[in-house]
Image (cartoon, grey):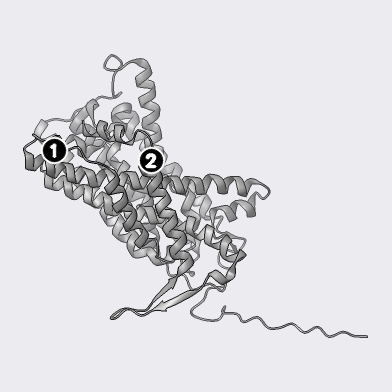
């Protein structure tokens, strides 16, 4: 007896102009939005510490190491970009996250292990950016206080209100639905990173002109000025600072998942990687080398703390750092949001419900209560932990010196 099997048709959006081949809303990322995501993730306020890093290594090793790490980052990023699709570069199976790529290629327990490392890193980065944002806000307040008091007031400032303010801002921006929708914030953040880098570079050039010569030495800080142990420690710390300044591999796949096709995502990603790594390396070389030329072996850990005038220009630089960190926080938080929401919605699909809220003069806003509550809790926890981290006040007092 022949049995007929009836298969209910599943609606597909593959032929629609609104959907991609995986039935998800059509991705809109380009080489420029991708480059802005990468630059926002890579170029942080750590660029202002590169003068100190070069001071530990000297004129020969310092710039050489910077170029070496840029080439390593470009090469490894190109390899990782190949992991987004398996097989055909246009229609192969997509790996939406770094963890999925590890699972597809390595399998076993490797994806769980890498996932723990990746998302712990992303969460820790959000905490670090909260602290860094508060430091820059406090620097603006303290600079204005010292200027208005003529240096008579010690201007001691509590960090907690500024961390809370940064957290409130992040609660608002965390409601951006996904990575693809925050392209404009990444562009603004990237512009801000260039702003404070240009200011730091300009101040360093002015300092060199004031000195009338380039400072520094071929081997950096010499033994005698510091002990052998301090020299070794400083060298390794400088290498770590430069290597960390290029780090963004943990979110590369997630950035690549915002790119439209055609052309293939890997082609666009490799092009964006070349542009962004090239631009950041140029800025790193300029800021690091000019900062070292300005201060020599006594280059400060933060280029802006070594120059006090014009104070208003330094305030602008610190404000640019804060705005950049707002965007950078989201670049690192969005993959974490997507990871948790995917698991929870798969387990309890009914909570993924949106409410259309009309906004006069604008498109209606789709409010997702789960997204609002969960992401608010995430921001609150990172803010509270940042406030509770021991020795933060000691670190701040050290930076004030």
Q: Residue at x 32, y 29 (%)?
A: 60
Q: Quadrant of residue 393?
A: top left
Q: Position of residue 364 (x, y in %)?
A: 37, 79
Tell me: residue 258, above or below residue 230: below
Q: Nearer the viewer, residue 316 or 57?
A: 316
Which residue has dot 1 on it? 308
Q: Residue at x 22, y 40 (%)?
A: 157
Which mark sits nearer the N-terminus, 2 or 1? 1
In the picture provided, is 240 more to the left or to the right than 226? Answer: right
Q: Position of residue 51 (x, y in %)?
A: 27, 35
In the picture provided, is 185 more to the left or to the right than 341? Answer: left
Tell me: residue 68, above or below residue 227: below
Q: CA distance from mark 2 to mark 1?
A: 30 Å
Q: Position of residue 214 (x, y in %)?
A: 17, 30
Tell me: residue 238, above or below residue 309: above
Which residue has dot 2 on it? 388
């Amino acid at each position: 007896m022949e049995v007929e099997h009836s298969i209910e048709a599943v609606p597909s959006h593959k032929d629609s102009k609104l959907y991609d081949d995986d039935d998800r809303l059509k991705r809109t990322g380009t080489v420029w939005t991708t480059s802005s995501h990468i630059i926002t993730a890579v170029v942080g306020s750590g660029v202002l510490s590169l003068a100190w890093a070069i001071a530990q290594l000297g004129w020969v090793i310092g710039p050489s190491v910077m170029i070496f790490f840029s080439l390593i980052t470009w090469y490894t990023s190109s390899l990782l970009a190949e992991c987004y699709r398996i097989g055909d570069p246009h229609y192969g199976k997509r790996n939406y996250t770094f963890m999925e790529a590890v699972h597809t290629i390595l399998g076993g327990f490797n994806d769980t292990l890498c996932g723990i490392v990746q998302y712990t890193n992303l969460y820790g980065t959000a905490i670090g950016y909260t602290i860094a944002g508060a430091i820059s806000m406090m620097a603006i307040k303290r600079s204005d206080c010292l200027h208005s008091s003529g240096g008579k007031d010690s201007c001691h400032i509590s960090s907690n209100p500024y961390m809370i303010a940064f957290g409130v801002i992040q609660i608002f921006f965390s409601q951006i639905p996904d990575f693809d929708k925050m392209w404009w914030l990444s562009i603004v953040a990237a512009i801000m990173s260039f702003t404070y880098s240009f200011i730091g570079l300009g101040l360093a050039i002015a300092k060199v002109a004031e000195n009338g010569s380039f400072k520094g030495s071929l081997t950096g800080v010499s033994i005698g000025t510091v002990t052998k142990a301090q020299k070794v420690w400083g060298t390794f710390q400088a290498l770590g600072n430069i290597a960390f300044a290029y780090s963004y591999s943990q979110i590369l796949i997630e950035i690549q998942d915002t790119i439209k096709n055609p052309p293939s995502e890997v082609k666009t990603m490799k092009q964006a990687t070349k542009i962004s790594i090239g631009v950041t390396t140029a800025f790193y070389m300029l800021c690091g080398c000019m900062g070292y030329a300005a201060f020599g072996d006594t280059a400060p850990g933060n280029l802006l703390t070594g120059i006090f005038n014009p104070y208003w220009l330094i305030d602008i630089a610190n404000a640019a750092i804060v705005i950049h960190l707002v965007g950078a926080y989201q670049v690192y938080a969005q993959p974490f949001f997507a990871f948790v929401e995917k698991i929870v919605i798969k387990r309890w699909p009914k909570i993924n419900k949106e409410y259309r809220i009309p906004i006069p003069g604008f498109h209606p806003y789709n409010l997702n209560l789960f997204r609002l509550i969960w992401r608010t809790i995430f921001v609150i926890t990172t803010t509270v932990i940042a406030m509770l981290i021991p020795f933060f006040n000691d670190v701040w007092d050290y930076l004030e010196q």
